[in-house]
Image: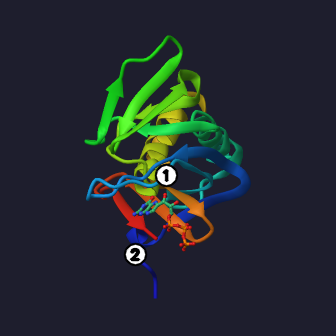
Amino acid sequence: MTMPDRQRSCTLHIRKDALKFSAAHMTVFPDGGKENLHGHNYQVELAVELAEPPALAHMLSYEVFKQALRAACNEWDEKVLIAADNPWLEMLAAADGEYAFRLCGKRYVLPTDEVVVLAVDNITAENLARLLCERFWEQLARDHSIFWPERITAVSVRIDESRGQGATYRMGFGNRSSEIVSE
Ligand SMILES: Nc1nc2c(c(=O)[nH]1)N=C([C@H](O)[C@H](O)COP(=O)(O)OP(=O)(O)OP(=O)(O)O)CN2
């Protein structure tokens, strides 16, 4: 029996010990409570779906994807991640070179160069997986000489905060839509 073409796919997956970033954050909960400031060594995994294994002339090297993912991870490495859209975030006046804020009633002052402010309402694995997936795709698209978007049917990024706990964000192209899976 022959399988219809639309049921076939080929997935490149990349999970390497070196694909990670170390960052600090505080998850805020719906009742307005929050965790203490703490850090994770976030492990990152990538899947790139293709309709078919590409012919030699269009082979996509793992390195192309790793470069784009590393560039996206590096922006967050050794930073404190702050959710700009959190309803319990209050910006405070600060000295030059400092970032001062109150979150859920507690006051923090940090060096500006150690802070990354992200356009999300909470620093969760779900939101980080979405942002990293989007950043990865933008980074890949920036280098047109190595990019054949029409051959890629979906990309997904999985982030594990700790072993066995994290989230995956998937962007499907064509008539499939983005979806998120929490673990
Ligand atoms: N839906 C989500 N829930 C939580 C997230 C998240 O990203 N998405 N993140 C956290 C925390 O940041 C945290 O680091 C994990 O917390 P928790 O599971 O409570 O703690 P442990 O990893 O130590 O787990 P144990 O199984 O208790 O050892 C919380 N929730």
- Residue 131, image x, y percentages: 43, 43
Give the residue pinned by disc 2. Answer: 4
User: Quick check: 183 left or right of 31?
Assistant: right
Ligand 1 within 8 A of label 1's CB?
Answer: no
Q: Is residue 147 visible?
A: no
- Residue 21, image x, y percentages: 64, 45
Ligand 1 within 8 A of label 2's CB?
Answer: no
Mark 2 crowdedness (10 Å alpha carbons): few <14, some 14-19, many ≥20:
few
Considering only order in the chain, which callout, 1 or 2, is on the residue closer to the N terminus? 2
Relative to 133, say whether 46 is above or below.
below
Give the residue pinned by disc 1. Answer: 36
User: Quick check: 46 left or right of 171?
Assistant: right
- Residue 102, image x, y percentages: 37, 35
Q: Nearer the viewer, mark 2 or mark 1?
A: 1
Of 59 and 92, nearer the camera is 92
- Residue 59, image x, y percentages: 65, 48
State the separation of the CA atoms marked 2 and 1.
52 Å
SS under mark 2 = loop
